[in-house]
Amino acid sequence: MEEAAPLESGEYEFVFDDVLEVRLLDQGGGALVAYGLLGKLPEDDEERREKLLLALKGELGPWGAPARKVLSLDENDHRFFVYQKVDYSRLDASDFVGVMDAFVNDLESWSGYLGQSVRSSRVPPAFVFP
């Protein structure tokens, strides 16, 4: 397997199951931010309200604080993202793979929970973890 090369933005991009795109951005000091796009809010007001309520319920439930993940909504284009800050300074390779595997599984679960399709994204995580 070839070593991953960063994008122009400095992020590393990985695609799982040909659908789930995960980006990693090194924050320095042994920390990085992993993030992935869940989908976009529907245009219909009632469907939008339903998705927002589902998102809030999920954020307060199994995928939010207990899992140390943050659900974010880009207010400009109404896309949902999941972010997780990872302190990799104390992880060996196997532990890091486990953390990333759990992140991808949670991303897939969130996507299914919200009934969203996953699409490619180019939004940096700086507005969540400055």
Image (cartoon, helix red, strand yellow):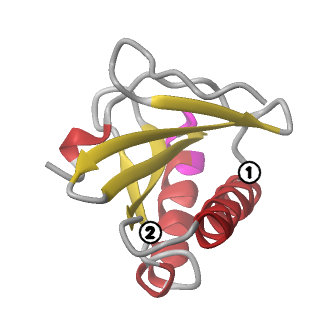
The question of residue 11 being in magenta is answered with no
Q: CA distance from mark 2 to mark 1?
A: 19 Å
Q: Residue at x 78, y 33 (%)?
A: 19
Q: Which residue is tagged 2?
A: 69
- Judging from the image, what secondary structure is the residue with disc 1 in? loop
* Residue extending farthest right: 17
Residue at x 60%, y 23% (from the top left corner): 120
Q: Is residue 53 above or below residue 125?
A: below
In the depicted structure, whether residue 26 falls above or below residue 9: below
Quadrant containing the N terminus in the rendered view: top right
The x and y percentages for residue 39 are 59, 38
Residue type beneath disc 1: Gly
Question: In the image, which residues are magenta?
Answer: 42-47
Question: Can you identify the residue that label 1 sits on?
Answer: 115
Q: Secondary structure at mark 2?
A: loop
| Residue 69 lies in quadrant | bottom left
